[in-house]
Amino acid sequence: MEVRDAVEEDAGALAAIADAPPDVMCDLIHDRTVRVAERRQSGDGPNLDADAIDAEVLGFVSFDAREDVVDVTGFGGTEDACELLLGEPIRFARKEGMAVEVVVPAAEDEMRAAVEAVGFGKAADGPTFGGEPTVRYRFSP
């Protein structure tokens, strides 16, 4: 699995993962730091063009920095991809001497498991979105 910066062409794959419209994900790519995890599948042969390499997007993370905290504004994908990608805002925060926060829907057991697996701790109940409760997690380096 490889991690790279998201590009506009990723909007469709990210939209499928996040269950959001592609234009919303395209705006996210333009407005935030967005990283994707992908599995590359290349064909055989010495004349294989680099554009012919198939890459499957397995997950994404988006984040931005405020004065003293890095906010994870969205993430999703396979459990392994999420765990790998959550390391991106953590690395940034460590370099800048900041904490990282993420809000996860309380009913999303897999997302909560991913943030807990990489070292986030429950900080408080989060805001309610669409009538659904959330949990606020925090990682302090």
Image: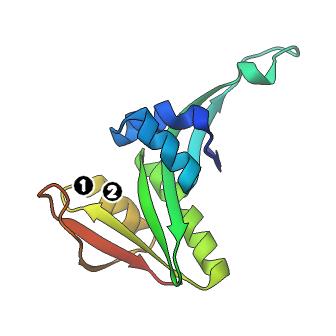
Which element type, helix, strand or loop, lies under badge 2? helix
The disc labelled 2 sits on which kind of residue? Met
Image position of 93 (left or right of 61): right
Q: In the displayed image of the protein, which residue is found farthest to the left?
A: 131
- What is the CA distance from the residue labelled 1 to the residue labelled 2? 5 Å
**What's the amino acid at mark 1?**
Glu
Quarter of image, res 137: bottom left
Q: Visible in this render: residue 59? A: no
Disc marking residue 108: 1
- Residue 74 location, quadrant: bottom left
- Foreground of the two, 131 or 82: 131
* Figure colour scheme: rainbow
When asked about the image quadrant of residue 53, the answer is: top right
Q: Residue at x 39, y 38 (%)?
A: 17
* Horizontal arrangement in the rendering, residue 76 relative to residue 4 (left or right): left
Q: Is residue 77 visible from the viewing direction of this image?
A: yes
Q: Position of residue 4 (x, y in %)?
A: 66, 47
Left or right of 136? Residue 31 is: right
Residue 117, position as x, y percentages in the image: 41, 66
Residue depicted at 47% across the width and 58% down the height: 83
Quadrant location of the N terminus in the rendered image: top right
Q: Is residue 16 above or below residue 104?
A: above
Residue 36 on image: x %, y %: 57, 46
Query: Is 86 above or below relative to 57?
Result: below
Q: Which residue is mark 2?
A: 111
Q: Is residue 70 above or below residue 108?
A: below
Contact, mark 1 vs mark 2 (Cβ under 8 Å): yes
Residue 47, given in percent of the width and then of the height, sits at 87, 14
